[in-house]
Image (cartoon, helix red, strand yellow):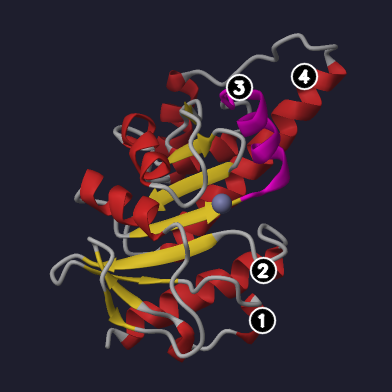
Amino acid sequence: MLEELKQKVLEAALEAERSGLCKHKSGNFSALDRVGGRMAISPAGMRREDLTVEDVPILSLDGRILEAGARGGPSSEYRMHAEAYRLRADILSVVHTHSQYAAAFAVSGKPIRPVLFEAAFYGGCEIAVAAFARPGTEELAKSIRGPLASADVCLLKNHGLLAVGGADIGETLRKAAYAEDVARAYFLALTLGGGREPDAISAEAFEGYRRDRGVRA
Ligand SMILES: [Zn+2]
């Protein structure tokens, strides 16, 4: 069932591992068949290097397993992924990471300001922090409603980062990677400046940048 969708999820999971964005089995990935209301999501607790297409389960958006993975159940964060798909019709892929600098801002409860042009790839906006909730819970799923209503990336308090996008899950993974790059530059700039806020890039400058380069956001 939905072999192509499973393949996309598998490739995103492997790329996240290879690039160092996700380590120690943390992070999860999904893609949606909008017509059928079915998502392919990475399985829980498996070494990503060992994953095959058969390991990727298919779930309905209310959490029913339509096709089990060959070894192990779905990611414990399936509720959060399903919530993102219910929230906005344009969302067709979801990436969740615990990348280190983004996690530091998530711990501090401090939004990540758009201090590098890489932020253009996720809309050029500040990355907001969702309200605290324990991992894997319905409360965590609900916490993303506000921050993701009008943005493609948000922080999960004391936890990590969530990125959403269209059918190209590789692009959604790139949003998560760029958010980590911006978080690192922002953290280092704050440190170099002794805590003083560095200048963020203006909406006008992002607009011109997108126009010049044909970047969609
Ligand atoms: Zn997590």
Residue 162 sits above or below residue 197 on the image: below
* Residue beneath disc 4: 190
* Badge 1 vs badge 4, beta-carbon distance below 8 Å: no
Going from the N terminus, do you reach mark 1 or mark 4 first? 1
- Measure the C-alpha gap from mark 1 to mark 4: 36 Å
Magenta span covers which residues? 98-113
Residue type of the residue flagged with mark 3? Lys
Going from the N terminus, do you reach mark 4 or mark 3 first? 3
* Residue beneath disc 2: 17
- Measure the C-alpha gap from mark 2 to mark 4: 28 Å
The residue carrying mark 4 has its beta carbon less than 8 Å from ligand 1: no
Question: How many C-alpha atoms fall within 10 Å of the one at disc 4: few (<14), some, or many (≥20)?
Answer: some
* Residue beneath disc 1: 49
The residue carrying mark 2 has its beta carbon less than 8 Å from ligand 1: no
Q: Is residue 160 left or right of residue 3?
A: right
The residue carrying mark 3 has its beta carbon less than 8 Å from ligand 1: no
* Badge 1 vs badge 2, beta-carbon distance below 8 Å: yes
Q: Is residue 29 left or right of residue 98?
A: left
Residue at image position (47%, 52%) is 136
Residue 138 sits above or below residue 74 on the image: above
Going from the N terminus, do you reach mark 2 or mark 3 first? 2
Residue at image position (33%, 29%) is 146
Residue 48 sits above or below residue 175 on the image: below
* Residue beneath disc 3: 110
> x%, y% of residue 201?
56, 21
Residue 111 is covered by the magenta coloring: yes
Going from the N terminus, do you reach mark 2 or mark 4 first? 2
> x%, y% of residue 137?
42, 48
| Residue in the foreground of this view, choosing between 185 and 215 | 185
